[in-house]
Amino acid sequence: MVRGRISRLSVRDVRFPTSLGGHGSDAMHTDPDYSAAYVILETDVEDGLKGYGITFTLGKGTEVVVCAVNALAHHVLNKDLQDIVGDFRGFYRQLTSDGQLRWIGPEKGVVHLATAAVLNAVWDLWAKQEGKPLWKLLVDMDPRTLLSCIDFRYITDVLTEEEAFEILQKGQVGKKEREEQMRMHGYPAYTTSCAWLGYSDNTLKQLCMEALQDGWTRFKVKVGADLQDDIRRCRLIRHLIGPEKTLMLDANQRWDVPEAVEWVSQLAEYKPLWIEEPTSPDDILGHATISKALVPLGIGVATGEQAKALQFLQIDSCRLGSVNENLSVLLMAKKFEIPVCPHAGGVGLCELVQHLSIFDFISVSASLKNRMCEYVDHLHEHFKYPVVIKNASYMPPTDAGYSTEMKEDSVKKHRYPEGEVWKKLLAAQEN
């Protein structure tokens, strides 16, 4: 029985100075400080049940997301959890269709990041209430109940609710066996930790060798700032990992369309599986052009959902509107048989998205062909329930919730700008 009224919402600006070590650096984001707007929902339940949600940012601008979360707070405050999940579709639409806030969205940008943070906290709360990890809550859910969490507005020309129901019904076959497979072997992952653009060659070599020793077979390289440097780095990495390992490229939206085709063609000899985010995420036709041009080279395109413009679909646990919107994308991907390879990393993205990948395999896609989930090996120590990686695979979380809860001491130290870490850094910058 879902119970509890949401009595308080608080949100904190939590930042980690990852830019100091070049961690997370790419062609577009040269000095990111991995950060999060961290939402806590408190309830009036006697045991003090709380829900925790995050949305990922890169430092500056986190304060803007915090403001947006506070602007959305009235939609959730004093609401009964039963009422929210009992009409989750209606609640989702209420959040994304606020008559005034929608003007600075809709369903993208700062407002949508804030929406994800709030909804991630709601899902964490629901899963904890049920005593299940989020992936298991979804796997055990009746198909009609699951679909009631999705807002089908704007997507019925691509996927109707009845089509989605048929997909979930088919997914019931063999579900128990796939769940056991996940518990035994986990969900395959790839690593981006070795080849951030700001890393020296020595660091790159060391991290690649360590990853190989740990059993990693899939590696992603950041590219896009300098072609000759990319050629040199890709040559180095391909030499280190050998011809049989999988290599992917990520340009982080750096190029225009002709530049993307020319640049990736120059890197084709290193046999990348895909080029990720080659151009603006809003340019659907541009992605289709790039995709068509790279077919003869055997290189796919990976990014967000783009009709007939990609070979690998990437979901995001924070840029999309939490679990609700990701469910619709997973179902659309299944309809068109596009493999889902989520990107993660950041602050908590690995913790969140593992649940979505595991659910997708068990209940929707029923396939691991050409599928893998990104993994980045930093900042997990700040979470109460960090990811568990074994044999280069995500092992299914066993703790109740969405794995979003951070350690209070970490939050206190890294709050911006009053936390201990930032007080020291800002004082040093002034001097």
Image (cartoon, helix red, strand yellow):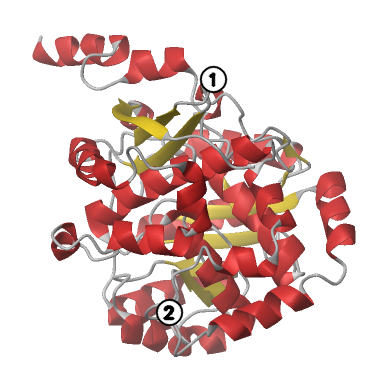
Rounded to the nearest whole Å, what is the CA distance between mark 1 and mark 2?
46 Å
The structure residue drawn at horizontal position 15% and vertical position 16%, both measured from the top left corner, is 429
> Can you tell which mark lies on residue 46?
1
- The residue nearer to you, when weighing 363 against 183, is 363
Q: Amino acid at mark 2?
A: Gln
- The residue nearer to you, when weighing 171 against 87, is 87
> Can you tell which mark lies on residue 151?
none
Assign the C terminus to one quadrant of the image. top left
Earlier-in-chain disc, 1 versus 2 = 1
Which residue of the protein is positioned furthest toward the left in this rendering?
Answer: 430
Assign the N terminus to one quadrant of the image. top right
**Horizontal and vertical percent for residue 257?**
30, 80
Q: Quadrant of residue 283?
A: bottom left
In the rendered view, does 261 fall on the left or right side of 103? right
* Disc number lying in front (1 or 2): 1
Circle 1 packing at 10 Å, graded few (<14), some (14-19), many (20+), is few
Q: Amino acid at mark 1?
A: Glu
The structure residue drawn at horizontal position 27% and vertical position 41%, both measured from the top left corner, is 73
**Horizontal and vertical percent for residue 65?**
24, 42
Q: Tag 2, which secondary structure?
A: loop
Q: Are marks 1 and 2 in contact (CB under 8 Å)?
A: no
Q: Tag 1, which secondary structure?
A: loop
Against 336, is 401 above or below?
above
The structure residue drawn at horizontal position 55% and vertical position 89%, both measured from the top left corner, is 296
- The residue nearer to you, when weighing 312 against 166, is 166
The structure residue drawn at horizontal position 47% and vertical position 58%, both measured from the top left corner, is 88
Does the image show residue 251?
A: no
> Can you tell which mark lies on residue 306?
2
In the rendered view, does 53 fall on the left or right side of 97? right
